[in-house]
Each structure stands twice: as structure tokens, then as C-alpha cells.
Image: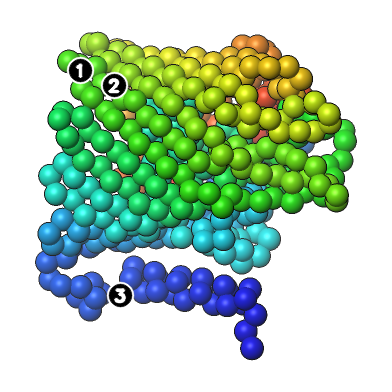
């Protein structure tokens, strides 16, 4: 008799082999002649070495085969697999925050296999329906999440990644259409996956007390039990073009992908409690510049407080961010952003108001085959942050090479300062086949 756990593994194995078959078998054996296929494989290798110690050392390999099938009558199917192996203390992150229907296959402690995307969509003019495992990006700022809080994200390397946020696809449905000059976007995701956290003891595991239910880095965490939410996430956005400006109003209701903590008899429960977000976005081009703005209000934000020990309460939360993209002469691009995160009330483990700033400048030389960049991310309230200079080279149409340095400063109980012993140099290569 097969146990429930082994049945689950058999289902995953069957799914993986089915997808591999779709990717590598001849298309003519699977679909009609009218269907066109695009198949690709992305291979990436990342190497990192700690500057202060070897705790930041990393060897990570990633393989992402993709199948994109365009079918008659506006139908399209797409599937992406993600095979990752990581050696070193950075790791691949915990899988306990994933809903069971999305959880990657834990091949061993260093190797995960995940169905990263799987969608079936239909499109006719301005109407599109998408079913399957997908993401919904609704913000206009670059990596500064104000209204862009529909998706769960990977936080296993904190902010020390190229593309922020690193979204986690979830199972559900999405409808996009236009009515009376308003572009509507409606999503319902039934998958309760929350933000993926770094595993305890790994390089980017949280150390600041504000992210550890008040326990500082010198205290050992008790037994932790993580509970993904059973609730769906629903969102609706209306987008309107007003002259050159683009504006939208949106609402997101469902579990917050950021966790909160509660006590149980044996230790701590990690939960993803429901909240409702109301937001506004605005962007306006003006010559070589684009101005961007986001504002969000959450009237029932679940937050941990020190009242009567460790408790969860609902507080009012305001988020706002403004950004500027500026195309400067000589192939130079500048992005400046500042974000505000304000939560009302007393006895919080975090400060009532966070002010985060990001600055990124990038210049392309040699016909943009070589890109030089520097990024600053920091807290203006806590005076901690990171600087990340990097260089990238398009060695060919299919090969991109990068090298960079991550320098972090601040105190151990601050947002970025908690990683002040993780300074590192890194190399990355990506092949598109």
C-alpha cells in the first residue's frame, strides 16, 4: 500500500516526466501543424566568496527549460521548470512556506526541482484569460514594494539579487480586459504560498530582533512550525490613461506574504494572516525622465507587538514610494527611489516608520555590450545599507557574464545591518540555449 507522502512524490515525478516530454519530443507528435513552438534552456552558474569569512561562500547552479506553444484561435501554453543545486551556507531557502500544491520537489538538501510556471491562456484583442501557475506584477517602482504585494517572493538572499522582487508563481486564474477606456485586471490565486525565507543558520537567515519576534541574534530560536495560509488571494485593478500619465487604483485581499509569529506549547508558529490593501499608482514620462508614484493603505495589517508577551494585532499601515527614471547622455541610466512604511501604535518590535532609499546608476559602453553599474540600498532611519557595484558583459548573443561586490554596513538589529558580516565578491554566467 502506498503512503500519502509517497503518492505525492509519485505525482510529482509523473508531472516532471510529462513536462520533460513536452519540452524534448518533436512538436509534430503532440500538436497540430498550426501550433508553433519555442523551446529554450537557460543555464546559470553563480560563485561567491565571503570577504570577512567563508560564511558567504556560494556555488549555485540553475537549469530552466522552457516550452512556449502558440496555438490557433488565440490559445497559448507555457511551462517552465527550475532545477537548482546550491553548495555553501547560502542554501536554497526553506520549503515550509510553500503550499503543498506548489512546493518544489526536495531531491536532497542541496537540490530542488520546481514547476516554476505553467499557464494556459486565451487572447482576443484586449481580452486575455490565463489559468495556471502565474504571477501578477502590479507596481510601477523598481523593487520597492508598495502596491506590488500580490505575489509571494523569494527572500532567501535578502536584497542581494539582480531582479527584485524574485516572484513565486502560484496557482489561480486571471482576467484582463478593457471597458470604457479602463483596462481591468482581476486575479484569484488559490495557492497559499508565502514569502520563501532563508533557512535557519544559513547566510541570510534573519538576525534582527524586529524580524525574529523580538529575539536578538544572540538568542536561540525555539522550535518553529510554519503554516502556509489556506485562504485565497483576490485582487482587482483598474488602469486609466490620462494624457501621458498612466494611473491605476487597486485592491488586494488575502493572506499577507510577510509572516507573523505566535506562541504555542512547544515554540513558535509562523503564520500568514489575511489583510486588505487599497492602492494607487501613477507614472508620467517627461522627456528623458519618467516619474513614478505608489501609495497603499492597509487598515488591518497583522503585526507582532510586545503587549502581553508575543501577540498578533491588526494595525493601520501606510506605504508610499516615489521614483525617478532618467536616461542621461552617453548611454547612462539613473534610478532614484524613496519609500515610506508607517505602522501605527506602540510596543512594536520594529520602528513605527521605516524610510528606505535606493539609487542605481548604469552605463553601457562598447555598443552596450559592457555594462557598468552601482546600486545603493539603505535605511535613512537606521543608517544602515549596502552598496553593490557590478560589471556585466554580453560576450555573445547567448552568453552573459557578470562580476560584482556586495558591501554591507550597520548594526546587527537593523534591516540591512543584520547582514554586515556577509560582504562578498561574486561571479555569474548565464547561457541562453
For the point 47% across and 57% down, the residue is: 82
Q: Is residue 99 above or below residue 377?
A: below
Residue shown at 51%/74% (left/top)?
11
Q: Position of residue 381 (x, y in %)?
A: 65, 11
Residue 55: which quarter of the image?
top right
Q: Secondary structure at mark 3?
A: loop
User: Residue 223's x, y, as percent?
Assistant: 82, 49
Classify 64 as above or below 182: below
Query: Please, which colouring scheme is shown?
Result: rainbow
Label 1 vs label 3, nearer the camera: 1
According to the picture, the residue beneath numbered tag 3 turns out to be 25
**Disc 3 crowd, CA 10 A, few/some/many (<14, 14-19, 20+):** few
- Element marked by disc 1: strand
Mark seen at residue 242: 1
Separation of marks 3 and 2 at Cα, in angstroms? 45 Å
Nearer the observer, 66 or 194:
194
Amino acid at each position: 500500500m502506498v503512503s500519502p507522502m509517497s503518492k505525492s512524490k509519485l505525482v510529482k515525478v509523473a508531472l516532471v516526466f510529462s513536462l520533460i516530454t513536452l519540452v524534448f519530443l518533436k512538436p509534430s507528435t503532440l500538436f497540430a501543424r498550426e501550433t508553433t513552438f519555442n523551446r529554450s534552456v537557460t543555464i546559470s552558474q553563480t560563485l561567491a566568496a565571503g570577504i570577512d569569512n567563508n560564511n558567504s561562500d556560494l556555488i549555485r547552479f540553475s537549469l530552466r527549460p522552457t516550452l512556449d506553444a502558440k496555438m490557433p484561435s488565440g490559445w497559448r501554453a507555457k511551462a517552465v521548470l527550475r532545477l537548482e543545486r546550491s553548495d555553501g551556507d547560502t542554501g536554497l531557502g526553506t520549503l515550509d512556506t510553500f503550499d503543498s500544491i506548489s512546493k518544489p520537489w526536495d531531491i536532497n538538501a542541496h537540490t530542488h526541482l520546481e514547476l516554476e510556471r505553467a499557464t494556459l491562456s486565451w487572447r482576443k484583442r484586449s481580452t486575455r484569460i490565463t489559468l495556471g501557475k502565474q504571477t501578477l506584477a502590479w507596481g510601477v517602482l523598481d523593487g520597492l514594494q508598495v502596491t506590488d504585494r500580490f505575489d509571494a517572493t523569494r527572500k532567501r538572499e535578502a536584497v542581494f539579487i539582480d531582479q527584485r522582487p524574485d516572484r513565486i508563481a502560484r496557482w489561480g486564474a486571471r482576467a484582463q480586459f478593457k471597458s470604457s477606456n479602463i483596462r481591468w485586471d482581476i486575479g484569484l490565486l488559490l495557492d497559499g504560498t508565502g514569502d520563501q525565507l532563508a533557512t535557519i543558520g544559513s547566510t541570510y537567515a534573519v538576525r534582527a530582533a524586529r524580524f525574529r519576534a523580538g529575539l536578538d541574534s544572540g538568542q536561540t530560536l525555539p522550535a518553529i512550525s510554519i503554516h502556509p495560509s489556506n485562504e485565497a488571494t483576490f485582487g482587482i485593478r483598474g488602469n486609466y490613461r490620462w494624457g501621458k500619465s498612466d494611473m491605476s487604483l487597486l485592491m488586494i485581499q488575502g493572506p499577507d506574504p510577510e509572516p507573523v509569529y505566535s506562541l504555542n506549547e512547544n515554540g513558535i508558529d509562523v503564520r500568514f494572516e489575511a489583510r486588505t490593501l487599497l492602492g494607487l499608482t501613477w507614472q508620467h514620462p517627461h522627456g528623458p525622465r519618467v516619474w513614478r508614484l505608489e501609495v497603499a493603505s492597509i487598515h488591518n495589517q497583522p503585526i507582532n507587538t510586545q503587549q502581553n508577551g508575543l501577540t498578533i494585532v491588526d494595525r493601520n499601515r501606510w506605504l508610499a514610494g516615489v521614483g525617478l527614471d532618467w536616461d542621461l547622455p552617453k548611454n547612462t541610466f539613473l534610478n532614484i527611489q524613496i519609500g515610506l512604511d508607517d505602522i501605527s501604535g506602540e510596543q512594536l518590535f520594529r520602528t513605527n516608520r521605516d524610510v528606505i532609499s535606493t539609487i542605481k546608476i548604469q552605463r553601457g559602453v562598447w555598443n552596450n555590450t559592457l555594462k557598468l553599474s552601482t546600486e545603493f540600498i539603505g535605511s535613512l532611519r537606521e543608517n544602515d545599507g549596502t552598496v553593490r557595484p557590478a560589471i556585466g558583459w554580453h560576450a555573445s548573443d547567448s552568453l552573459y557574464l557578470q562580476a560584482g561586490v556586495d558591501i554591507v554596513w550597520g548594526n546587527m538589529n537593523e534591516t540591512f545591518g543584520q547582514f554586515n558580516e556577509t560582504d562578498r565578491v561574486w561571479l555569474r554566467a548565464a547561457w541562453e540555449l
